[in-house]
Amino acid sequence: MTTIKDIAEQAKVSISTVSRILSFDETLSVTDETRQRVLQTAEDLQYKRRSRKAKRRITANIGIVQWHTMSQELNDLYYMQIQNGVENKANSLGIATESMTLDEILGQDSVALDGLIMIGKFDRIEIRDLKKLKLPMVFVGQNTLPEGFDSVQSDYETPIKTIIDHYLKHHIKDIGMLIGQEQTSKETDIIPDPRLVTFTAYLRQLNLFEPKFVFKGDYSPESGFEMMDQAIKQLGPDLPHGFILGSDAMAVGALRALSQADIAVPERVSIVSFNDVAIAKFTTPTLSTIHSQTELMGERAISLLKKRLENPKRIPQSNVYASEFIRRESSI
C-alpha cells in the first residue's frame, strides 16, 4: 500500500507537506503546481502507473479540454483522474495530447489537431461553437448523443441505491445528503446532479425522504465543512445517522466538522462519498466511497476517438460505466 512517505519521496516534498495537502489544509501556503504534483503523484502511485514517455511513433495529435480551472480541479480530483486515463491510453497508442481550455480552442482560426476529448459539462452554445471546428470529438461526463457526438459517463443511479440499501440493512433510516451543484464551463446553465434526483426518488418510494436532510454547496472540502457544520447546528439531535456525499474532497471537510463537534464517525454518523481518489485512504477515519471507473472512462474516450478517426461516419455511441462500493472506516 502506498504511504505518505512514498508520495513525499516521489514528489520531492516533505512528509508534512504531503499530509497537509492530502487533508486539504487551508493554512498551507503552496503553489497550485506543487499541490498538483503531490496529488498527481498520489494518484500515480495508487494505480502504479508506468512512465508517460511515448515509446511509439506519433499517429495523431489530440487536444484535451477540461471544463474546470486548475484550482477547481485540485479541489475535486474526479476530472483529473479521467484525464489521467486519457493521457495514459493515448501514450500507449502513440497519440500525442495537448491540454487546453475551451477559450483557447474556440479562439483559434484554424486548429492543428486531429480530434478533441472534452472533459466535463458544456452547454448547447458551446457545443454549437465546437461543431464549427469540424473535428472528431468525444465528450466525457455528459450525454452528447443528441448532438451527434460519442460520450462516456458514469452510472450514478445504481450506487446511490446501493448505499441506501446498505444503510437500511444496518437499520439506518434517517439518511442525509451533502451534494454539489455544477454549472457548465461558462456558468450559463445549472446542472442538477443525477445522484440527488435518484436519492430523492428512491427515499420517497420508501417513505423515508426528509428535505431538511439535504444540503447543497459545491464539491470542495470547504463546502463540505460548511454544509456538515450547518447540518449539525440546524438539526441537533435529529442529525441523520447516515450521509451520502458527492465527492471525497467534500467528505474531508465534513469529517473535520464532525470532529470539531465531537461527533463520532461511524459510531454516530456514517459517511459514504464518491470517486475513491487517493486521499480517501489517508483521511481519519478512511473513507467508504464509490469507486468510479474514471481511468477506464478516459481510456474508453481515447478508444472511441481513435475509431472515429478511422471511420468518421460510424454511428455515435454512449458508454456508461458501473461503479463499485468500497467500504472502509467511515461507515458501518
Image (cartoon, rainbow, N blue to C red):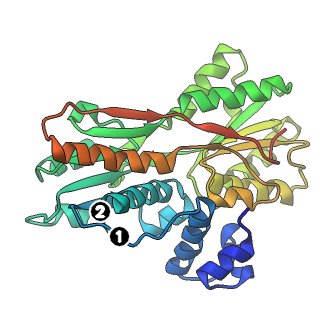
Residue at mark 1: 54
Going 37% across and 59% down the picture, which residue do you hit?
92
283 above or below 147?
below
Kind of residue indicated by mark 2: Gly
Q: Nearer the viewer, residue 57 or 273?
A: 57
Please report the residue visible at 75 percent of the width from the left and 45 percent of the height from the top.
231
- Could you tell me which secondary element the residue under label 1 belongs to? loop
Q: Residues at badges 2 and 1 in contact (C-beta under 8 Å)? A: yes
In the rendered image, which quarter contains the N terminus?
Answer: bottom right
Precedes in sequence: disc 2 or disc 1: 1
Q: Decide which of 59, 105 is in the foreground and name it.
A: 59
Image quarter in which the C terminus is found: top right
Residue 296 percent across, percent down from the top left: 47, 46
Does 186 appear above or below 174? below
Q: Residue at x 15, y 47 (%)?
A: 131
Residue drawn at x 82%, y 55% is 285
**How many residues crowd mark 2 within 10 Å: few (<14), some (14–19), many (20+)?**
some
The one of 23 and 309 positioned closer to us in this rendering? 309
Residue 122 visible: no
Q: From the viewer's perspective, is residue 324 above or below residue 282?
A: above
Residue 146: name its quadrant. Answer: top left
In front: 228, or 246?
246
List the residue tagged with mark 2.
94
Q: Position of residue 10 (x, y in %)?
A: 61, 79
> Dividing the picture into quarters, in which one does residue 17 lie?
bottom right
Disc 1: CA contacts within 10 A as few (<14), some (14-19) or many (>=20): some
Residue 16 visible, this angle: yes
Identify the element where label 2 is drawn.
loop
- Eyeballing the image, is 102 above or below 138? below
The extreme left residue here reads 109
Q: Quadrant of residue 204?
A: top right
